[in-house]
Image (cartoon, grey):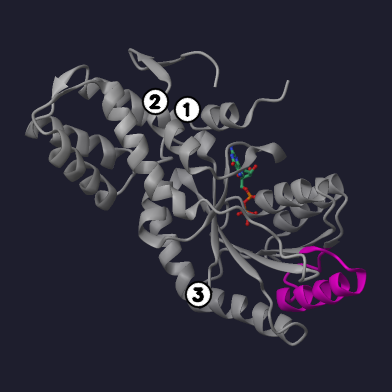
Amino acid sequence: MALGFFSRLKEGLSRSTQKLGGNLSAVFTRRRLDDAALDELEEVLIAADLGPAVAGRVIESFRSSRFGAEVTDAEVRDALSAEIARVLEPVAVPFTPDPARRPHVVLVVGVNGTGKTTTIGKMALQFGRQGLRTILVAGDTFRAAAVEQLQIWGERVGAPVIAGPPNADAAGLAFEALKKGRAEGADLLLIDTAGRLHNKGALMEELAKIIRVMRKFDETAPHSVLLVLDATTGQNAIEQVRVFKELVAVTGLVVTKLDGSARGGIVVALADQFKLPVHAVGVGEQAEDLRPFSAADYARGLVGEGLKLHSGAVVEQGED
Ligand SMILES: Nc1nc2c(ncn2[C@@H]2O[C@H](COP(=O)(O)OP(=O)(O)OP(=O)(O)O)[C@@H](O)[C@H]2O)c(=O)[nH]1
């Protein structure tokens, strides 16, 4: 039986949950909220990658509302989950292709290996199931494996893939795909891009050229620029957003590999710092594992709300 939305997310986040939720239990098994407890709490939050700004605010909020009170780990967890959900709420925006575009052009950017190609494949499959006609563009022409991987997804999904020979001009491919998409009334054009050129200037020029050339055909393209980030890189994801925002007008984020990571808190730090929409999160390699991002579910999953922790092991309390 297919897992429900929250179950799948919860399963994917389990390593992050154990880290944050487990550490919370270790700090607060009924304890007075004094300076030492708040210091320990701050350390747990920072170790969970929530970032110093969010951690600092959470501590201040606890200090002003409950200082000196005796609290349990469940209370701390509930209050923390609410605080995290507040940070995430504004960025939990699903990706919705604009039906007026035909095709809605999406440039997918990010460092190599973050999961761009896989995310494109998953999106193509999910939108294909909704009846949207999608074209894929193998714009990472420097890596033969990336082209092959996209072709495999294209076959699985039944979506045409526009690819060229090794080192082909990505801008030319994107232009050709856009023309084809318009002629055929496609709904969505997903463009894979190279993530590592020999320097930042070269990468910027590559992306700028793709955009410039596509605009000769449709001056509103691209309609979205999705930056794919790998959660396992933790705080490094912050730096990647900074760099890519300088290169191109990023409109939204996808955070992948949360299943292999105890660093799910990074999404909170990203949301707080950049306020960019988080369209989806990746919690595994299957198409279904690209999940729309829900603030409340994510916050609950991260702190392990509704879970009971025994000596570090997560035990479920009933069904969700
Ligand atoms: N566990 C897990 N693996 C993922 C997820 N997303 C992607 N991957 C895996 O991460 C690896 C890299 O993904 P790619 O899609 O090739 O990454 P890319 O950014 O396109 O990188 P290049 O192809 O090297 O440019 C692959 O083995 C994917 O199956 C995820 O959410 N969870």
Amino acid, disc 3: Leu
Q: Nearer the viewer, residue 144 or 175?
A: 175
Residues rendered magenta in the picture: 162-188
In-front residue for pair 213/163: 213
- The amino acid type of the residue labelled 1 equals Ser
Which quadrant is the C terminus positioned in? top right
Crowding at mark 3 (Cα within 10 Å: few <14, some 14-19, many 20+): some
Q: Which mark is residue 247?
A: 3
Q: Residue at x 75, y 82 (%)?
A: 218
Whether residue 177 appears in magenta in the rendering, the answer is: yes
Estimate the x, y position of residue 105 in percent, counting from the top left: 72, 69
- For marks 3 and 2, give the one nearer the viewer: 2
Q: Which residue is at the front of the view, 42 or 262?
A: 42
Q: What SS does tag 1 mark?
A: helix
**Is 309 a magenta residue?**
no
Q: How many C-alpha atoms fall within 10 Å of the one at disc 2: few (<14), some, or many (≥20)? A: many
